[in-house]
Amino acid sequence: MSAASTAPSDTALLGFARDAATRAYAPYSQFSVGAALLLSDGSVVTGCNVENASYGLAVCAERVAVGRAVADGLLGTGRAAGTTIEAAAVVGPGAAPCFPCGACRQVLHEFGCARVVVEGEDPKADTPATPLSLPFSELLPRAFGPGDL
Ligand code: THU
């Protein structure tokens, strides 16, 4: 999506995620989610959830963002082989923090996600929510990953 000269703040990352959520395709759940990945090369890649009439085929915002980053050559193999996810910001439709689901945690871990940023609880209506940044090991302790094979 973009490569900023200075790393975006957590508040800015949440803003990118919130913007991505406006493009969510969520006609079944009405639960629009946006994700913004800050990569170690400074790139920011966003995603939104994409649902399907066959409900179980819904893809979460986080996995859409990861797939997009890989498809764009920013994450994964070749020149991007050493790139990791420094932060994954996730925004849902409500006031409560929207944490990545279990499947997304595993996919984020594949690419070395260091921390997750969500909107802190109980934001005041007229101010942006305070970012809540959590180390990834708190979300997926004792994770299985590429280093375990
Ligand atoms: N969803 C996400 O996009 N990310 C999450 O981490 C949690 C759930 C989506 C999937 C589905 O489209 C909707 O939210 C309701 O579960």
Image (spheres, helix red, strand yellow):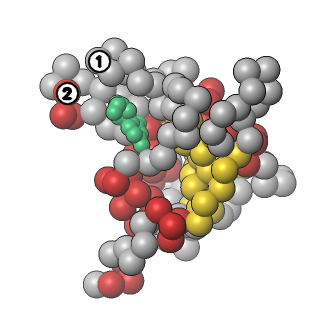
Residue drawn at the location 66% of the way across and 50% of the way down: 132
Q: Which mark is residue 147?
A: none
- The answer to whether the residue labelled 1 contacts the one labelled 2, judged by CB atoms less than 8 Å apart, is yes
In-front residue for pair 3/124: 124
| Residue at the top extreme, as displayed | 27
Compared to residue 27, the image places residue 122 above or below, namely below
User: Is 139 situated left or right of 85 in this image?
Assistant: left
Quadrant observed for ligand 1 in the rendered image: top left
Mark closest to the chain's N terminus, 1 or 2: 1
Q: Quadrant of residue 116?
A: bottom right
Residue drawn at the location 34% of the way across and 15% of the way down: 27
Whether residue 16 can be seen here: no
Q: Mark 1 points at which residue?
A: 28
Coordinates of residue 90 in the picture (x, y in percent): 55, 42
Dot 1 falls on a residue whose secondary structure is loop
| Residue at the left extreme, as displayed | 54
Dot 2 falls on a residue whose secondary structure is helix
Coordinates of residue 58 in the picture (x, y in percent): 27, 33
User: Is 55 situated left or right of 134 in this image?
Assistant: left
Q: Specify the amino acid type for callout 1.
A: Tyr
Q: Which mark is residue 55?
A: 2
In-front residue for pair 8/139: 139
* Dot 1 beta carbon under 8 Å from ligand 1: yes
Mark 1 to mark 2 CA distance (whole Å): 8 Å
Q: Dot 1 surroundings within 10 Å: few (below 14), some, or many (20 or more)?
A: few
